[in-house]
Image (tube, grey):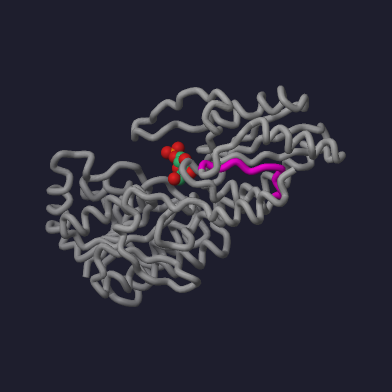
């Protein structure tokens, strides 16, 4: 068989571990050819790929990023993109393609598989942990650990200066990273896209904490957090070339407002892409490895249109159509029953 593999969307720690597992099972054990396409769908449309064997994946298990490169965008960006993709499958004799991606890439993969008959299986990835159908995506745990380490460090400097630190983490539609890192780091308050906030209430939480003699307040904010309408003026977000709202401004609005309302100095820390960089945690390496092996099983089973998922500790398959245009938002019980208990 000829099995293709590509990585799509934003990179995340663990992508290389998936690629390695696919190559080890399909090529080294199964004797099949594995073609790694460069730069996501660009590599497919332009026939830019390399054959992957054990020598090519040696040593990549702990490496962050993706050896194949990644891009946003898809064949649907071109009028003849689907036709060209089908032609490449035919020209290269591709029996299957494994798409490792987040919500956007999996939606594209689902459309190509179910609506256009291409033999594609999916592997969910993203630090955002927001793919519907799986209990977890790899990369998330690593991002949470990076954010938690940062919060721990910020505690001591915040305490020394009696400051309010506003720490902005990734998560445009779902606040998983903010919620988990906020709980792990002992945040004073956590602001997520799913629960619009009232800045006056956040300020009251900070003031109450200081009244108790605590000298550091750490407010963890997901980049997509939004105020309750009419409670705080936020600039209209600009759109990037993919039509996504450009984030990175909410913490800049929150911090001065908290200073104004509480009288305490504030500082903003935007963690940004450091959350996506570097080596995956052991948990993410194991999950990536299990997903990679299961993706090859999905190819052998011709389970096209499916993706591999984690369900109560087991690796299973569900239809990628579950992801189309959807976002897996946070567990509200975790926010209300656990996180909120420690606010203030
Ligand atoms: O989807 C993953 C993610 O890291 C989001 O959390 C973040 O909003 C976005 O990608 C950033 O995208 P880019 O790398 O294109 O700036």
**Residue at image location 35% in from the left, 69% down from the top:** 317
**Residue at image location 67% in from the left, 39% down from the top:** 219
Given residues 203 and 29, the one toward you in this image is 203
Question: Which quadrant does the C terminus fall into?
Answer: top right
Residue 276, image x, y percentages: 52, 47
Quarter of the figure with residue 256: top right
Given residues 126 and 263, the one toward you in this image is 263
Residue 91, image x, y percentages: 13, 57
Residue 54, image x, y percentages: 38, 67
Residue extending farthest front: 230
Given residues 90 and 216, the one toward you in this image is 216
Quarter of the figure with residue 18: bottom left
Residue extending farthest right: 213
Work out whether residue 76 can be spotted: yes
**Residue at image location 26% in from the left, 44% down from the top:** 74
**Residue range highlighted in magenta:** 185-193
Given residues 132 and 274, the one toward you in this image is 132
Query: Is residue 190 covered in magenta?
Result: yes
Residue extending farthest bottom: 29
Question: Which quadrant does the N terminus fall into?
Answer: bottom left
Q: How many marks?
A: 0
- Asked if residue 55 is positioned above or below residue 156 in the image, the reply reads below
Quick check: 103 left or right of 178?
Answer: left
Residue 134, image x, y percentages: 43, 62
Quick check: 243 left or right of 227?
Answer: left
- Asked if residue 25 is positioned above or below residue 226 in the image, the reply reads below
- Asked if residue 185 is positioned above or below residue 246 in the image, the reply reads below
Query: Is residue 131 covered in magenta?
Result: no
């Amino acid at each position: 068989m000829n099995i293709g593999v590509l990585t799509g969307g934003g990179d995340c720690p663990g992508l290389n571990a998936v690629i390695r597992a696919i190559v080890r099972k399909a090529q080294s054990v199964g004797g099949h050819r594995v073609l790694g396409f460069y730069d996501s769908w660009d590599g497919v449309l332009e026939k830019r790929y390399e054959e992957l064997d054990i020598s090519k994946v040696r040593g990549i298990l702990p490496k962050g990023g993706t050896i194949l490169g990644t891009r946003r965008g898809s064949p649907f960006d071109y009028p003849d993109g689907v036709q060209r993709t089908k032609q490449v499958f035919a020209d290269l004799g591709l029996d299957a393609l494994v798409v490792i991606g987040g919500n956007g890439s999996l939606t594209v993969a689902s459309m190509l598989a179910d609506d256009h008959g291409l033999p594609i299986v999916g592997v969910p990835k993203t630090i955002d942990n927001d793919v519907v159908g799986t209990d977890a995506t790899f990369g998330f745990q690593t991002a949470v650990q990076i954010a938690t380490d940062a919060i721990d460090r910020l505690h001591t400097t915040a305490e020394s200066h009696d400051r309010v630190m506003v720490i902005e983490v990734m998560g445009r539609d779902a606040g998983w990273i903010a919620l988990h890192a906020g709980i792990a780091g002992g945040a004073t308050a956590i602001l997520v896209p799913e629960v619009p906030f009232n800045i006056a209430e956040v300020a009251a939480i900070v003031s109450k904490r200081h009244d108790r003699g605590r000298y550091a307040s750490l407010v963890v904010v997901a980049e997509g957090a939004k105020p309750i309408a009419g409670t705080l003026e936020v600039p209209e977000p600009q759109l990037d070339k993919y039509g996504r709202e450009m984030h990175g401004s909410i913490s800049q609005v929150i911090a001065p407002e908290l200073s104004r309302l509480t009288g305490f100095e504030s500082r903003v820390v935007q963690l940004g892409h450091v959350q996506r960089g570097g080596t995956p945690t052991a948990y993410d390496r194991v999950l990536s490895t299990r997903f990679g092996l299961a993706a090859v099983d999905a190819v052998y089973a011709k389970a096209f249109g499916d993706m591999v998922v984690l369900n109560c500790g087991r690796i299973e398959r569900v239809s990628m159509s579950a992801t189309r245009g959807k976002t897996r938002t946070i567990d509200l019980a975790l926010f209300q029953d656990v996180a909120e208990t420690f606010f203030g």
